Amino acid sequence: MTRPISLFTGQWADLPLEEVAALAARWGFDGLEPCVLGRPPRRQPLGR
């Protein structure tokens, strides 16, 4: 049984996701691990 191999997309953040997906498929990867840049939104305390 083989393990699926995914590609981390951070190195290709300047390309559209569709293009990265097409390249990954052509290179034989099984999936993508999307890179998320930045911080999550800051939550405000309740009642303020």
Image (cartoon, rainbow, N blue to C red):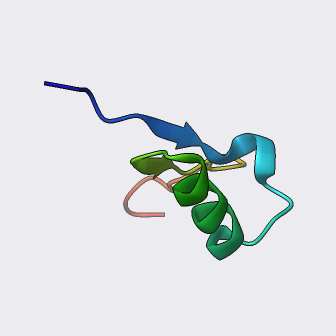
Residue appearing at x 78%, y 51% in the figure: 12
Q: In the image, 15: left or right of 41?
A: right
Residue 30 horizontal/vertical position (percent): 39, 47
Residue appearing at x 65%, y 47% in the figure: 9
Q: In the image, 17: left or right of 30?
A: right
**Where the N terminus falls, by quadrant?**
top left
Residue closest to the eye, 13 or 1: 1
Residue 34 seen in the current view: yes
Residue appearing at x 39%, y 63% in the figure: 47
Residue 48 horizontal/vertical position (percent): 49, 63
Displayed quadrant of residue 19: bottom right
Residue 2 vertical position relative to residue 8 in the rendered view, above or below: above
Residue 28 vertical position relative to residue 20 in the rendered view, above or below: above
Displayed quadrant of residue 17: bottom right
Outermost residue on the right side: it is 14
Q: How many marks?
A: 0
Residue appearing at x 50%, y 54% in the figure: 43
Residue 41 seen in the current view: no
Residue closest to the eye, 21 or 8: 21
